[in-house]
C-alpha cells in the first residue's frame, strides 16, 4: 500500500505556470471561480452565495493536504499571483494506487493551453511523486471541452453511467475516463 505525503506542501511549476497551496487570501478569487456561470455550468452543484462561504471549503482542502488524503493547487501564471484556476487529486486510494483529478479554470484563460499544461504537470506529479497507477476523471458528458482535454492527454473512456446521480430535481449522467501509468 502507498502512503501519500503532501507535507511539506509541494509547490510545482511548468513552463508558464506555478502551482501553490490555497489560502484564505485566495477567498475572493476562489469564490469568483466557483461561482462563474461558465465554470459551474457542468459542475452540478449550487454556487456559494458569498465569499465567506468558501472559507470552510478552503479549510477542508487544507485539511485534506495535511491528512494526505487529497491535494489541490492554485494555478497562477509565473507573471502574476492572480488565481487562474485550480487542479488537484481527490478520492485518493493508496491501496489501489489511484486518484481522481479535478480542475477548474477561469474563462479569462480558456483557449490558451493553460489547462493542458497544468494537467500534464499534475499527471507527472501523480506518476513520479504519488506513484499512482491510475488517474481517473468523472465528468459531465456534456462538457466536451473537458473530455477533449482528457482524451488529448491519453485518458480513455472507461464507462458511461446513465442517471448516475441526482441534482436539482433530476438524474444526470456521468462519464468516467482514466489514464494508466505504463
Image: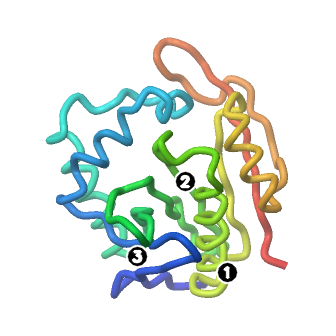
Q: Where is residue 96 in the image (x, y as percent from the top left)?
A: 67, 72
Count neighbours of disc 2 (C-alpha within 10 A) and say few if under 14, some if 14 to 19, many if 20 or more. Answer: some
Which marked residue is nearer to the observer: mark 3 or mark 2? Answer: 2
Q: In which quarter of the image is the N terminus?
A: bottom right
Q: Does the residue at mark 3 contact the one at mark 2 (Cβ under 8 Å)?
A: no
Toward the viewer: 41 or 63?
41
Mark 1 surroundings: few (<14), some (14-19) or many (≥20) residues within 10 A: some
Among the two numbered marks 3 and 2 on one chain, the one whose residue lies closer to the N terminus? 3
* Res 68 quadrant in image: bottom left
Q: Which badge, 3 or 1, comes first in the chain's sequence?
A: 3
Residue holding disc 1: 127
Can you give x and y, in whole percent of width and height, for residue 172 in the image?
A: 63, 23
Asked if residue 27 lies left or right of residue 65, the reply is left
Element at label 1: helix
- The residue carrying pointer 3 sits among few (fewer than 14), some (14 to 19) or many (20 or more) residues within 10 Å by Cα, namely some
Residue 72 seen: no
The dot on residue 68 is: 3
Q: Which of marks 1 and 2 is nearer the N terminus?
A: 2
Marks 3/1: CA distance?
16 Å
Q: Which residue is drawn at 65% across and 56% down?
A: 113
The figure's colour scheme reads: rainbow
Q: Where is residue 12 in the image (x, y as percent from the top left)?
A: 47, 80
Residue corresponding to mark 2: 102
Amino acid at each position: 500500500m502507498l502512503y501519500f505525503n503532501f507535507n511539506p506542501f509541494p509547490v510545482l511549476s511548468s513552463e508558464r505556470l506555478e502551482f501553490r497551496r490555497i489560502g484564505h487570501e485566495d477567498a475572493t478569487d476562489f469564490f469568483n471561480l466557483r461561482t462563474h456561470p461558465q465554470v459551474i455550468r457542468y459542475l452540478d452543484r449550487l454556487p456559494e452565495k458569498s465569499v465567506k462561504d468558501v472559507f470552510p471549503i478552503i479549510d477542508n482542502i487544507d485539511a485534506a493536504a495535511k491528512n494526505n488524503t487529497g491535494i489541490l493547487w492554485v494555478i497562477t501564471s509565473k507573471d502574476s499571483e492572480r488565481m487562474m484556476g485550480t487542479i488537484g487529486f481527490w478520492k485518493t486510494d493508496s491501496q489501489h494506487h489511484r486518484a481522481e483529478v479535478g480542475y477548474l479554470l477561469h474563462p479569462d484563460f480558456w483557449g490558451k493551453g493553460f489547462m493542458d499544461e497544468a494537467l500534464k504537470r499534475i499527471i507527472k506529479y501523480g506518476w513520479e511523486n504519488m506513484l499512482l497507477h491510475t488517474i481517473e476523471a468523472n465528468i459531465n458528458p456534456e462538457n466536451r471541452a473537458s473530455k477533449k482535454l482528457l482524451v488529448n492527454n491519453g485518458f480513455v473512456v472507461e464507462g458511461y453511467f446513465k442517471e448516475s446521480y441526482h441534482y436539482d430535481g433530476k438524474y444526470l449522467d456521468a462519464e468516467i475516463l482514466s489514464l494508466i501509468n505504463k
